[in-house]
Amino acid sequence: MPAGSGKIMKKAPITKAGFEKIKKELEYLKTVAVPENVRDIETARAHGDISENAEYTAAKERQAFIHGKIQELENNLATSEIIDLKNLTTDRIVFGTSVVIEDVKTGKDTTYQLVGPHESDIGRNKISVTSPIGKALVGKSIGDTARVNAPGGVREFEIVDIFIAAED
């Protein structure tokens, strides 16, 4: 964003557990992965000619990846705002709540927790409040139907339950 544009950058919501997880990963990269990678580069360099040294090339590529990941995590932390989940209610879906939804077409139930974009992880059923399904669910109550524009067309989900999951 250009300086002086007058726009205020909105911070992304994040749970305390999500924030701590990012901090822990960042700490690991800085204290373990970087020093290991430096040793790998030194070892590969000691093998002689680095122009045709696959170990050296791989270690340098890994170094670039690690430093890129560090920048990404630092940016995620800087642009996040921890949202306190202590006072959540279950009368409607909001950031931090967990929800059981039923696909109206298939009858299949799925449970999701609505989290911020920096901590979403579909493999752990954590979806971002800014995702299409997250946006469709926010504000809904048990018994409501959420309509989501999906690549295969509009999908409908009935809200079966709203609850507060323990933070991991």
Image (cartoon, rainbow, N blue to C red):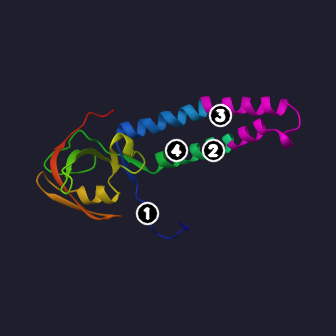
Q: Secondary structure at mark 1?
A: loop
Q: Nearer the viewer, mark 1 or mark 4?
A: 4
Residue 19 placed where, x, y %? 41, 40
> Which mark is drawn over residue 148?
none
Are discs 4 and 2 less than 8 Å apart at CB?
no
Left or right placement of residue 32 versus residue 94 in this view: right
Q: Is residue 141 left or right of residue 51?
A: left
Image position, residue 151 (x, y; %): 36, 64
Secondary structure under badge 3? Answer: helix
Toward the viewer: 11 or 97?
97
For disc 1, the neighbor class at 10 Å (few under 14, some 14 to 19, many from 20) is few
Among the 4 quarters of the image, the one containing residue 130: bottom left
Alpha carbon distance from label 1 to label 3 = 34 Å
Disc 3 and disc 2 in contact, CB within 8 angstroms: no
The CA distance from mark 2 to mark 1 is 30 Å
Kindly report the distance in space between the C-alpha atoms of the residues bearing marks 4 and 2. Answer: 12 Å
Measuring from the top left, give residue 15's x and y in whole percent. Answer: 34, 42
Dot placed on the residue nearer the N-terminal end, 3 or 2: 3
What residue is pinned by disc 3? 34
Q: From this viewpoint, which residue is outermost toward the front? A: 106
Numbered circle sitting on residue 73:
4
Amino acid found under the numbered disc labelled 3? Val
Label 4 residue SS: helix
Q: Which residue is mark 1?
A: 8
Mark sitting earlier along the chain (1/3): 1
Q: Earlier in the sequence, mark 4 or mark 2?
A: 2
Q: Which residue appears at 50% of the width and 71% of the height?
A: 5
Label 4, residues with CA under 10 Å away: few <14, some 14-19, many ≥20 = some
Q: Amino acid at mark 2?
A: Phe
| Mark 3–mark 2 distance (CA, rounded to whole Å) | 10 Å
Q: Amino acid at mark 4?
A: Leu
Q: Foreground residue, 52 or 144?
A: 52
